[in-house]
Amino acid sequence: MNVVNIGYGSTNYYAIYCQNKYLLIDVGLPGTFGMMKNQLKKCGINLKDIHHLIITHFHPDHCGIAQEIQSSGVQIVISKTQLDFLESANKSMKKYPEYKEIIVNPKNILNENNKNTFFEKLGIPGYILHTPGHSDDSISIVIEGLGIFTGDLPLLYHVFSESDEKIELSWSKIRSTNEKKVFPGHGNSIELNSLS
């Protein structure tokens, strides 16, 4: 397994290669589908080789072109918790003229913390953690032996607000995974033990 950051602008989007196919984590703002295709091409990745997309949270810079990606043959996967936020996310993003409403096949809604269904669906060893703190729909994706993809979960002690308790709880879940590397939605990857 290996990971390629295909991000553009200030946001990271990750393509994870495993068993001759890719899992994509997050995609760009509405109207940037062409940029995403260019980034994939630069990295030597064919869109047809991407089988699944997981969205860490429903903010425009992380899911803005998700439906366009899905229309190209990639299946969108979300967690059961995120399902409760999908309708309101679609409504709030109607302000972007290029935004296409996200539609998720019920077979692609996964329970958090379930390694079996994650592997059955994606063919990659891992699972989803619900990690609120940035937003209540935020998840982190654990890819066993590779690391944790945390989206926009704030680093501990970098913010001071009422959400600190949620953030601490989310990082506690992440620490319990025994993974070593964190791949955030913005900035460079970091060693998990450096965050203690």
Image (cartoon, rainbow, N blue to C red):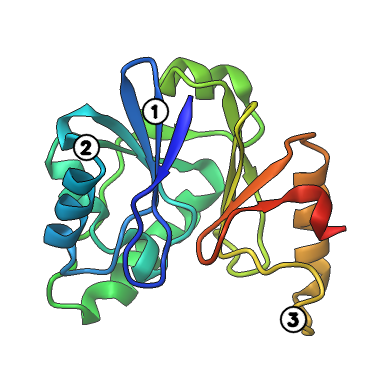
Rounded to the nearest angstrom, the CA distance separating label 1 from label 3 is: 33 Å
Along the viewing direction, whichever of 151 and 104 lies nearer the viewer? 151
Find disc 2 in the rendering and name its residue.
44
Q: Secondary structure at mark 1?
A: strand
Where residue 138 sits, quadrant-wise, is bottom right
Q: Position of residue 149 (x, y in %)?
A: 56, 47
Left or right of 113: which side holds 51? left
Q: Residue at x 73, y 36 (%)?
A: 179
Find disc 1 in the rendering and name its residue.
17
Name the quadrant of the C terminus. Answer: bottom right
Label whose residue precedes the other's in the sequence (1 or 3): 1
Label whose residue precedes the other's in the sequence (1 or 2): 1
Specify the amino acid type for callout 2.
Gly
Label 2 Cα neighbours within 10 Å, binned few <14 / some 14-19 / many ≥20: few
Q: Secondary structure at mark 2?
A: loop
Specify the amino acid type for callout 3.
Val
Find disc 3 in the rendering and name its residue.
159
* Between marks 2 and 3 in the image, the one whose residue lies nearer the viewer: 2
Label 1 Cα neighbours within 10 Å, binned few <14 / some 14-19 / many ≥20: some
Along the viewing direction, whichever of 4 and 11 lies nearer the viewer? 4
Q: Residue at x 32, y 56 (%)?
A: 27
Q: Secondary structure at mark 3?
A: loop
